[in-house]
Structure formats: C-alpha cells, structure tokens
Image: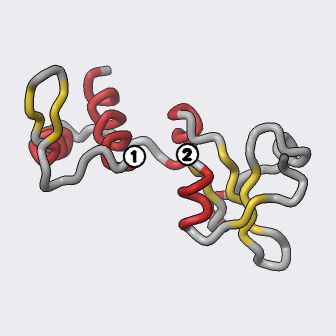
C-alpha cells in the first residue's frame, strides 16, 4: 500500500505543478527532494496511476474528441457529461481543471453552464 501511495503522491505533486524533479518542496517544516522520491519509487517499482485512475484523484473533467475531430471538454453538471465516455486509446483523456483542458487546446462543451 505504501508503494501505491508514494506513486500517487509523486504524480499529484508533479501534475499539480507543486513540485518539479529538480526543486525540493517544503512539507511540515521539512524539505523533501522530489527526485529522491522518484528514485525510491522506481527502485521499489511503484506503480504509477494510469489516466483512468486519475478520476480517483478528482480529475473528473472529460476530454472527448468529436466525430469531426474537435476536442471538447465536459464538466460534471454539463448536460452531456453522464453520457460522454472517454476512450483513452483514441486520444481522449481526463483533466483535473478547466485551465488544464484549455491549455491543452480543448474547448468547453456548449451545453455546459
């Protein structure tokens, strides 16, 4: 269990922009070297969460590619959210924030509030 939590912590810190591989971070008054965490994870063969596991990390924005190839993101509460299915092998993906989706070149679904 520790291995999975360590892998998820690394992914969260790096993905959220809270840390880089080259700069230490401060936590509870202690400096933590992210590179050391990554090395430890690799040595222990820590599984890295897949994109589909990102939903468990509150990354619940669906990045869908339309039949015409348009990249559209759907927020929870959008009319089409519940019926939108993400096919990662087709290039569709999950996002953790609207800004992440926009920066990746996706637009908001027209039926979203």
Q: Which label sits on residue 96?
A: 2
- Could you tell whether 28 is left or right of 102 in the image? left
**What number of labels is visible?**
2
**Badge 1 or badge 2: first in the primary sequence:** 1
**Residue 110: quadrant of the picture:** bottom right
- Assign the N terminus to one quadrant of the image: top left
Q: Residue at x 19, y 27 (%)?
A: 27
Toward the viewer: 48 or 33? Answer: 33
- The residue wearing badge 1 is 16
Q: Residue at x 36, y 35 (%)?
A: 8
Q: 10 Å neighbourhood of mark 2: few (<14), some, or many (≥20)?
A: some
Residue 103, position as x, y percentages in the image: 54, 66
Q: Say which element carries label 2.
A: loop
**Residue 55: quadrant of the picture:** top right
- Could you tell whether 58 is left or right of 85 in the image? left
Residue 16, position as x, y percentages in the image: 39, 46
Q: 10 Å neighbourhood of mark 1: few (<14), some, or many (≥20)?
A: few
Q: Residue at x 66, y 61 (%)?
A: 92
- Could you tell whether 42 is left or right of 7 in the image? left
């Amino acid at each position: 269990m520790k291995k999975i939590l360590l892998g998820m912590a690394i992914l969260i810190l790096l993905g959220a922009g809270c840390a880089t591989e080259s700069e230490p971070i401060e936590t509870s008054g202690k400096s933590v070297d992210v590179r050391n965490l990554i090395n430890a994870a690799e040595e222990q063969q820590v599984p890295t969460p897949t994109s589909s596991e990102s939903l468990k990390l509150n990354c619940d924005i669906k990045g869908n590619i339309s039949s015409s190839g348009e990249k559209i993101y759907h927020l929870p509460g959008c009319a089409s959210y519940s019926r939108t299915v993400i096919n990662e092998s087709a290039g569709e993906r999950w996002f953790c924030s609207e800004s992440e989706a926009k920066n990746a070149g996706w637009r908001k679904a027209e039926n979203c509030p």
